[in-house]
Image (cartoon, rainbow, N blue to C red):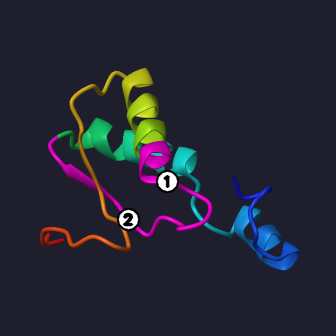
Amino acid sequence: MLEYGNYPFYLKKRISSDTGHLSNTDAAQALTSILSINPNKKILLSHLSENNNTVNVAKETVCSCLKESGIDDANICVATQDLSFEWYSV
C-alpha cells in the first residue's frame, strides 16, 4: 500500500526504513512474543495510517500471525481515527 500510495518519496522512504513505522507484520511478531509470556491481555491496534492501512488488513495480519504461533483466542480490538472507542487503562 505504501509503495502505491500518495505520499511523497521522502516520506515513503522514511516510513519503509528500519526506523520508520512499525508494519502490521512486525507488530504481529512482537505481539506473538508478548502473548507467549502473558496470554491474557487485550490487544488494541491503534495509530493506523488513514492512507496506507485498513482496519481489516491490520487485524487480519495480526490474527494470522498469532494463529500461526498457536494463539487462537487473542482479544483484538482496533481503534480508528473517526470513531469513538472505549477507554483503556495501561
Q: Nearer the viewer, residue 62 or 86?
A: 86
First in sequence: mark 1 or mark 2? 2
In the drawing, does residue 82 fall left or right of residue 21? left
The residue that appears at 50% across and 44% down in the rendered structure is 57
Q: How far separated are the C-alphas under marks 1 and 2?
A: 11 Å
Q: Which residue is mark 2?
A: 46
Q: Regarding mark 1 in the picture, which secondary structure is present there? A: loop
Q: Quadrant of residue 6?
A: bottom right
- Residue 49 within the magenta-colored segment of the rendering: yes
Name above or below for residue 66 compared with residue 88: above
Q: Which residue is mark 1?
A: 54
Q: Quadrant of residue 37?
A: top left
Q: Regarding mark 2 in the picture, which secondary structure is present there? A: loop
The residue that appears at 76% across and 64% down in the rendered structure is 17
Mark 2: give few (<14), some (14-19) or many (20+) Cα within 10 Å.
Answer: few
Q: Nearer the viewer, residue 51 or 58?
A: 51
Instruction: Tell me the magenta residue range.
Output: 40-58
Q: Nearer the viewer, residue 49 or 24?
A: 49
The residue that appears at 43% across and 37% down in the rendered structure is 60
Q: Residue furthest right?
A: 9
